[in-house]
């Protein structure tokens, strides 16, 4: 059954965007599909242009200098404690060898120091998180933002890994958002050569056993990145590759490393192909031989993987599952996979195929939004822009989706069952939010702007019969129509 224009607009915002805000349903009701397509064609769509944010190399160097200064301060403090206080002649003593005749007067209490704030790597992380949140809150629809979130989770890294925290946001901007509407092969290469990924999956230290460095240092091969590229990033689990392919591919990408900040204060933290670490010789990966051309050997394997039919099916299934249903319509998956192959991995064309497919609109709204989507949806619906990012980050943590901190290389789960247990925590957050905001946000106005076109009779009655404004707001934010895509 065809939806009326307002219901179709609300569906577009909930399923494909970051959620409705005041005026957004009316703004796109005349042509919801056209509005989604137009967002993809806007200059700079999906990018975050903030001159205050550091590039990954600069962030790594800044974090390294900060850590060096912290280490130097701790060493100086330990040395001062070991030396003891000065004696009457001004010389340092061990403290216990010379005691004053009378107990000294207590030293004056130092003035309270101002809060230094979070350590620099954490501050960089928070600045990136704030910019990401503002991009979502400021988007007209948010389809480009949702695509950025999808690909960032597909190619996830974790800020919990040492060395990644200060560059997790830069990674998303540089490797994901910069290639959001280009070809998948370009995004794949940008991701796998980015310092955040090389650190997260341990390839920066992977050494070919027969390389110059391998023979001298007796250090070995690390297969983590090669395995996850095949299993998660391209072909999918248990498809056309074997364990031998994983090992050979791991040999191919030895030498894909990072310039140490300690050695190069100008370019430290940036990508480096270190030929001394690279395993020499040709390698055969999934039945195809690749001559030893140094870095280009790895680029050639990635280009082949990016065009493989198994990659098309894997990505199509994940994209349809994320936006439409835990069990996406097979016709939709086939449509997306075919478009991917026909356009040689054009991600914009794949996104257009998604929002023009009838199956993407006809599927029931049964898929639970992930915590991050719900949090942003609450803020957009109520028109709130938090002055500080801390409470938003705490909400992400409480609901089990800490930003850029997935539990494993496969990213956060994208099926409803994984998030059902967190609904009680969503209720707690909705209650806290409603108590603070009830005086400002009229639940009736919010309901009409963001939920009315999709609301059932039961939801309407529950909100209308609420005993207070906070209760009405909680019922609205926890309504099935608000929770689901």
Image (cartoon, helix red, strand yellow):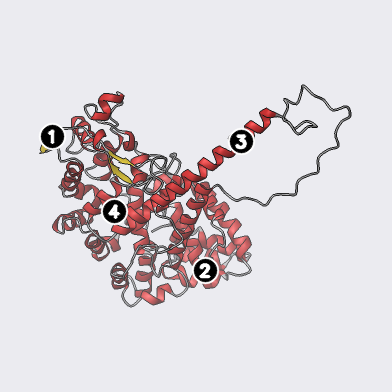
- The residue where tag 1 is placed is 282
Seen in the picture, residue 460 relative to 107 is either above or below; the reply is below
Circle nearer the viewer, 3 or 2: 3
Sequence-wise, which precedes: disc 4 or disc 1? Answer: 1
Label ID, residue 453? none
Structural distance between the alpha carbons of marks 2 and 4: 29 Å
Seen in the picture, residue 380 relative to 54 is either above or below; the reply is below
Circles 4 and 1 in contact, beta carbons < 8 Å: no
Quarter of the rendering occupied by the C terminus: bottom left
Structural distance between the alpha carbons of marks 4 and 3: 54 Å
Left or right: residue 29 compared with residue 89: left
Sequence-wise, which precedes: disc 3 or disc 2? Answer: 3
Circles 2 and 4 in contact, beta carbons < 8 Å: no
Structural distance between the alpha carbons of marks 1 and 2: 58 Å
Structural distance between the alpha carbons of marks 4 and 1: 35 Å
Sequence-wise, which precedes: disc 1 or disc 2? Answer: 1
- The residue where tag 2 is placed is 383
Circles 3 and 1 in contact, beta carbons < 8 Å: no
Specify the farthest residue to the top: 97
Structural distance between the alpha carbons of marks 3 and 1: 52 Å
Residue 421, given in percent of the width and then of the height, sits at 48, 44
- Residue 352 visible? The answer is yes
Circle nearer the viewer, 1 or 2: 1
Q: Residue at x 56, y 57 (%)?
A: 430
Label ID, residue 76? 3
Circles 3 and 2 in contact, beta carbons < 8 Å: no
Label ID, residue 319? 4
Q: Residue at x 68, y 31 (%)?
A: 81
Quarter of the rendering occupied by the N terminus: bottom left
Q: Which residue is drawn at 35% across and 45% down?
A: 195
Specify the quadrant of the image occupied by residue 20.
Answer: bottom left
Residue 82, given in percent of the width and then of the height, sits at 67, 28
């Amino acid at each position: 059954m065809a939806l009326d224009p307002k219901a179709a607009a609300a569906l577009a915002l909930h399923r494909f965007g970051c959620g409705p805000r005041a005026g957004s349903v009316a703004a796109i009701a005349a042509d919801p599909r056209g509005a989604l397509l137009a967002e993809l064609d806007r200059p700079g769509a999906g990018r975050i242009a903030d001159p205050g944010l550091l590039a990954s190399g600069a962030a790594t160097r800044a974090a390294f200098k900060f850590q060096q200064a912290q280490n130097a301060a701790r060493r100086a403090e330990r040395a001062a404690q070991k030396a003891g206080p000065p004696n009457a002649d001004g010389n340092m003593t061990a403290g216990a060898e010379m005691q004053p005749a009378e107990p000294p007067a207590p030293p004056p209490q130092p003035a309270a120091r101002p809060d230094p704030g979070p350590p620099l790597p954490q501050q960089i992380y928070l600045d990136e998180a704030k910019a990401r949140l503002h991009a979502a809150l400021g988007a007209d629809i948010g389809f480009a933002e949702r695509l950025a979130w999808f690909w960032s989770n597909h190619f996830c890294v974790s800020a919990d890994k040492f060395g990644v925290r200060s560059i997790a946001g830069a990674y998303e901007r540089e490797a994901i958002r910069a290639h959001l509407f280009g070809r998948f092969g370009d995004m794949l290469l940008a991701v796998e050569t980015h310092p955040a990924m090389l650190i997260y999956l341990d390839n920066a230290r992977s050494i070919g056993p027969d390389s110059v460095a391998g023979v001298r240092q007796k250090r070995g091969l690390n297969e983590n990145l090669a395995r996850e590229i095949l299993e998660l990033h391209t072909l999918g689990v248990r498809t056309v590759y074997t364990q031998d392919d994983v090992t050979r591919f791991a040999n191919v990408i030895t030498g894909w490393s990072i310039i140490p900040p300690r050695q190069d204060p100008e370019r430290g933290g940036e990508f480096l192909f270190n030929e001394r670490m690279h395993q020499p010789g040709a390698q055969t990966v999934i039945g195809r031989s690749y001559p030893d051309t140094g870095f280009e050997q790895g680029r050639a394997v990635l280009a082949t993987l990016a065009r493989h039919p198994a990659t098309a099916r894997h990505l199509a299934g994940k994209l349809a599952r994320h936006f439409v249903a835990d069990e996406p319509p097979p016709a939709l998956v086939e449509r997306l996979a075919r478009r991917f192959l026909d356009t040689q991995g054009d991600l914009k064309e794949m996104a257009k195929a998604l929002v023009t497919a009838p199956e993407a609109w006809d599927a029931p709204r049964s898929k639970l939004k992930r915590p991050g989507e719900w949090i942003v949806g609450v803020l957009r619906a109520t028109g709130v822009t938090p002055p500080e990012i801390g409470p938003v980050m705490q909400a992400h943590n409480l609901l089990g989706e800490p930003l850029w901190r997935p539990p494993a290389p496969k990213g956060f789960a994208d099926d409803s069952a994984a998030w059902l247990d967190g609904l009680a925590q969503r209720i707690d957050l909705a209650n806290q939010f409603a108590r603070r905001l009830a005086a400002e946000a009229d639940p009736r106005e919010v309901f009409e702007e963001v939920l009315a076109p999709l609301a059932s009779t039961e939801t309407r009655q529950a909100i209308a019969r609420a005993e207070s404004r906070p209760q009405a707001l909680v019922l609205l934010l926890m309504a099935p129509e608000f929770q689901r895509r």
